[in-house]
Image (cartoon, rainbow, N blue to C red):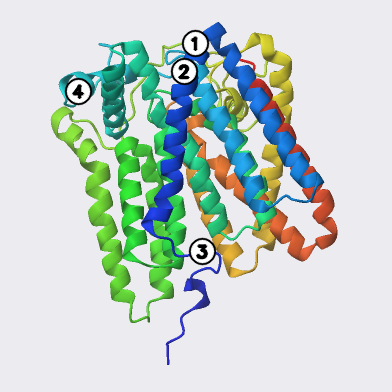
């Protein structure tokens, strides 16, 4: 007779055991599709500042929405085809933005060759085949993203020996990371057992959110590190339900590569450790306890060397402290440490949106307001689109409020084991991200520090809480489902329209 195990540790019914081949296939198809679109539309993106491509993007999205509406009208809509249409629209926005935006436009700290910026980091590895000889400027970052970029740069020069062409091609990596994050997000929502309507709601937010669009066209390590964070989230959940060596090894590699991309990915370590500890405590009398311990040791043996070797190298070579962040002078015009803690952290001057919906890295000082603005527009302004931007900002605030209210509601009402897991796990991620973000802004009071790109993962946790809230309302307060769903869908729909409208207009 088989020994029964705790319900907490049975594999969730919706989580099917997948082969590695099936797990990798969506990402392979995604990479192929990006390369095909890049080859087909690269030349079009150069015409009239990308205007032709933007028109093609909006027309394609209109056709997809029309197909979706027809499927609904004729009652042929299924979860799968609705999900595919949402993801394809997100794909069009990401790849389109990457194509119509030149590599030296709307970037962070890229510099030029010889300046120790992101471009120089890539070019140094491409040109010399080795790491930079100092930790100056952006050279302090771990090298995984830059190795990949140098490889793409090398391949691009085989087709066309031109640095501008090659640097444009380098953005295929963050674009792939952004598109692949949609796939991982879907798997996260599926593994925490959101219902199909809740998954569609959450996925629409993730697929349409501007932060993934503009970071997908960046030349830095942000988007790739975000992708690895989502993979660690997914495989922490998978390991919680199925303590197998496959899951723990993939989790370890994802965390290690994430830290080798950007050291801030280490923020996932305490969250993973909390899950490990919980599993050990719950199974302290289980005869497999020793096996769990060995798995955790294997996790450390893989992730720590993989994630920390570059930091240790720089500590030895340059006396660079662990967790080092590039120091900035308080005499820079982006310094905002002269404002009080109350002005920066204890108020939200929403009236400032009346003057401009766009962030100003020099004059803005309030963390929350800057976060709201930069989540939509990065660090950039588009004066000719001020009206659209204000509408977008208002809808964004409403969506954030719905997300926060959903989080509170879920905490009060989540009772079953799966919902409890989801609420605590996502809340822990959210708290660690926001806590680290606030501390970062206290320690480094500069305009650029307030950028939403440091907490983009909260888009996924926020979308997850909205999905969970919908499911719990459906279970506990069925009479509220229709009005709640109407408000949620309307807000998400308006947010999506604003995102498509804005990012096919710039």
Which sits earlier in the primary sequence, circle 2 or circle 3? 3
Image-quadrant location for residue 495 = top right
Q: Is residue 78 left or right of residue 116?
A: right
Q: Which mark is residue 15?
A: 3
Give the mark toward the camera: 2 or 3.
2
Give me the residue at 32% from left, 32% from top.
145
Which sits earlier in the primary sequence, circle 4 or circle 1? 1
Give the mark toward the camera: 3 or 1.
1
Which sits earlier in the primary sequence, circle 3 or circle 4? 3
Q: Which mark is residue 42?
A: 2
Judged from the image, the secondary structure of the residue bearing numbered disc 3 is loop
* Residue 320: percent from left, percent from top: 22, 30
Give me the residue at 29% from left, 39% from top.
260
* Residues at marks 2 and 1 touching, judged by CB atoms closer than 8 Å: yes
Give the mark toward the camera: 3 or 4.
3
* Residue 467: percent from left, percent from top: 66, 52
Q: Nearer the viewer, residue 383 or 276?
A: 383
Disc 4 target residue: 132
Give the mark toward the camera: 4 or 1.
1
Which sits earlier in the primary sequence, circle 3 or circle 1? 3
Image-quadrant location for residue 281 = bottom left
Disc 1 target residue: 46
The extreme top residue here reads 48
């Amino acid at each position: 007779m088989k020994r029964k195990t705790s319900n907490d540790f049975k594999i969730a019914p919706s989580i099917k055991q997948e082969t590695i081949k099936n797990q990798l296939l969506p990402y392979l198809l995604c990479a192929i599709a990006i390369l095909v679109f890049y080859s087909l539309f690269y030349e079009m993106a150069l015409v009239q500042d990308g205007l032709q491509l933007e028109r093609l993007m909006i027309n394609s999205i209109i056709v997809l929405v029309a197909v979706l509406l027809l499927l609904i009208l004729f009652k042929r809509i299924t979860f799968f085809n609705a999900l595919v249409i949402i993801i394809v629209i997100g794909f069009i926005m990401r790849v389109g933005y990457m194509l119509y935006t030149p590599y030296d436009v709307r970037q962070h700290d890229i510099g030029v060759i010889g300046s120790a910026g992101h471009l120089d980091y890539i070019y140094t590895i491409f040109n010399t085949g080795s790491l930079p000889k100092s930790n100056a400027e952006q050279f302090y970052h771990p090298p995984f993203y830059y190795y990949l970029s140098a490889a793409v740069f090398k391949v691009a020069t085989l087709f066309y020996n031109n640095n501008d062409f090659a640097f444009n091609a380098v953005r295929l990596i963050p674009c792939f990371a952004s598109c692949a994050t949609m796939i991982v997000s879907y798997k996260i929502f599926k593994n925490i057992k959101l219902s199909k309507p809740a998954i569609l709601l959450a996925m629409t937010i993730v697929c349409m959110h501007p932060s993934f669009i503009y970071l997908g066209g960046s030349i830095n390590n942000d988007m790739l590190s975000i992708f690895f964070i989502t993979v660690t989230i997914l495989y922490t959940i998978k390991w919680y339900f199925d303590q197998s060596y496959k899951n723990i090894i993939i989790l370890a590699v994802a965390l290690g590569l994430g830290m080798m991309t950007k050291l801030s990915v280490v923020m996932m370590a305490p969250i993973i450790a909390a899950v490990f500890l919980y599993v050990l405590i719950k199974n302290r009398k289980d005869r497999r306890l020793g096996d769990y311990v060995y798995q955790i040791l294997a996790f450390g043996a893989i992730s720590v060397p993989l994630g920390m070797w570059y930091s240790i190298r720089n500590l030895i070579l340059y006396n660079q402290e662990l967790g080092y962040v590039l120091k900035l002078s308080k005499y820079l015009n982006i310094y905002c440490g002269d404002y009080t803690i109350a002005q920066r952290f204890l108020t939200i001057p929403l009236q400032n949106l009346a003057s401009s919906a766009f962030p100003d890295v020099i004059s803005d000082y309030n963390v929350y307001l800057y976060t709201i603005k930069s989540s939509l527009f990065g660090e950039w302004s588009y004066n000719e689109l001020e009206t659209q931007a204000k509408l977008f900002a208002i809808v964004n605030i409403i969506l954030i409020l719905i997300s926060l209210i959903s989080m509170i509601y879920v905490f009060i009402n989540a009772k079953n084991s799966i919902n409890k897991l989801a609420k605590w796990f996502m809340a822990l991620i959210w708290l660690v991200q926001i806590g680290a973000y606030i501390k970062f802004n206290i320690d480094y009071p500069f305009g650029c520090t307030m950028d939403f790109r440091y907490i983009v993962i909260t888009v996924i946790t926020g979308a997850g809480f909205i999905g969970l809230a919908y499911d719990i309302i459906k279970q506990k307060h069925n009479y509220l489902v229709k009005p709640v769903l109407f408000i949620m869908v309307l807000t998400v729909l308006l947010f999506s329209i604003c995102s498509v409208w804005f990012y096919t207009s710039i």
